[in-house]
Amino acid sequence: MRTRFFSNFRSLTSHQRHAFIACFLGWSLDAFDYFLLVFCVSAIAADFHARTSAVAEALFLTLAFRPVGAFLFGAIADKFGRRPALMINIGCYSVFELACAFAPSLHALLILRALFGIAMGGEWGVGAALAFETLPKEGRGFFSGLLQEGYAVGYLVAAAVYATLYKPFTHLVWHGNVVGWRGLFIVGALPAVLVFYIGFKVEESPVWRAGQSQAAKPAVSMASGIKQYALTFLFIILLMTGFNAFSHGTQDLYPTFLQKDHGFSAALTGGIAVVYSIGALLGGIFFGGISERFGRKRTIIGAVLLSLPVIPLFAFGHSLYALAGGAFLMQFMVQGAWGVVPAYLTELSPGPVRATFPGLAYQLGNLLASRNAVVQAKAAEHYGSYGVVLAVTVLIGAIYLAIVTCFGREVRGVELSSE
């Protein structure tokens, strides 16, 4: 895998490498900012004297408002270019992340996380369009897996920051709470520096530029694009509903599960999260790469079904090592299936609205699955166990995804153009 990684990157031009690195880091840092909240749910609940399920509403609002960002920033990218849209997008989510550190109440935090959700919702579609319109079609599956696992890298960095920075600052107090969660949100504003890298190093998508040069070509609106490809649009929404429920259902409350059901400290929780984030990263690259040989559909189905035998270790392990191993394997499969998604959705999408079409469908699926964390938290509070809730989530999510994926088209290796 290491040899293939370097050979794929050596084959890229400087322009292609910078574009991919910018999109990868944009998605990684976006995920980093999102998952900082996941690790701080318990601390925020204690600080504001609220129930865990009340704080989980912040996760719901972030996910629920992502379609707004997908439409807004996707439309900007389709009209004015992928590069400026990505720069504005990253700047916005960094500013909202910083503002969360100064939230005076849970209500204010919920509003800020909704605004963060709008900014977060635009990054994936714009970044995927810029990356795959710039990269060669050879090795698209590999780069799809690597790009999507920027999400896992963001989770890993959030876990590492939480594990290493949360405890050492216990002597510093802010509104009765350890600097912990507020200090971490200040760190979360650092992605803003990526804007400068994009401005100096990244060029516009050649496919978008080619489309702009065709002056006689009639403009295609988002509405007409959705109408023409209505069945594909509906399929992606249903597919991404399952994917988002599957992913967030196994990640968002897993740190809370480790703390509530097993009494693990912040350091242990963060350490396990680092372990399963590495599993997620490896799984995305592995399954994304083999999708070039076996096809996008078969790879997704295989990965999600392989998550089922891991449930006992993942949700019912009794030791630190069993839980860490189960979480590693679970995220290897979950994010392995996800590794195919960027290439698959980009290949399914029409050229003139490629920055908006897959991103909007993706985030509408996210909207339909956005209550997942709240439902899980309330069910766990009712039944007294997060483990059972996590197990049921995996079972339903894997079966649903396998069935829905069967109805999709196989489009591996299709040429991407502005047409």
Image: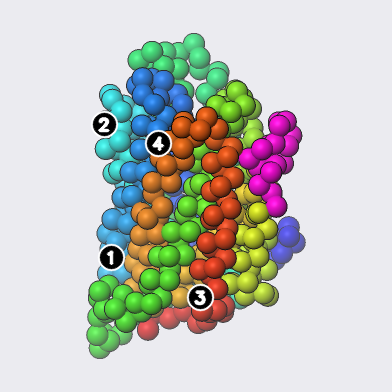
Quadrant of the rendered image containing residue 72: bottom left
Instruction: Classify residue 413 as left or right of residue 356.
Output: right
Q: Secondary structure at mark 4?
A: helix
- In primary-sequence order, the first of circles 1 and 4 is 4
- In primary-sequence order, the first of circles 2 and 4 is 4
Proximity of marks 2 and 4: CB atoms separated by less than 8 Å:
no
Residue type pointed to by label 4? Ala
Q: Residue at x 46, y 37 (%)?
A: 379
Pointer 3: residues within 10 angstroms few (<14), some, or many (20+)? few
Q: Is residue 318 magenta?
A: yes
- Tag of residue 108: 2
Q: Secondary structure at mark 2?
A: helix
> Residue tagged by mark 4?
56
On the image, the x and y values in percent for residue 243 come to 50, 58
Proximity of marks 1 and 4: CB atoms separated by less than 8 Å:
no
- Tag of residue 407: 3
Q: Residue at x 36, y 54 (%)?
A: 367
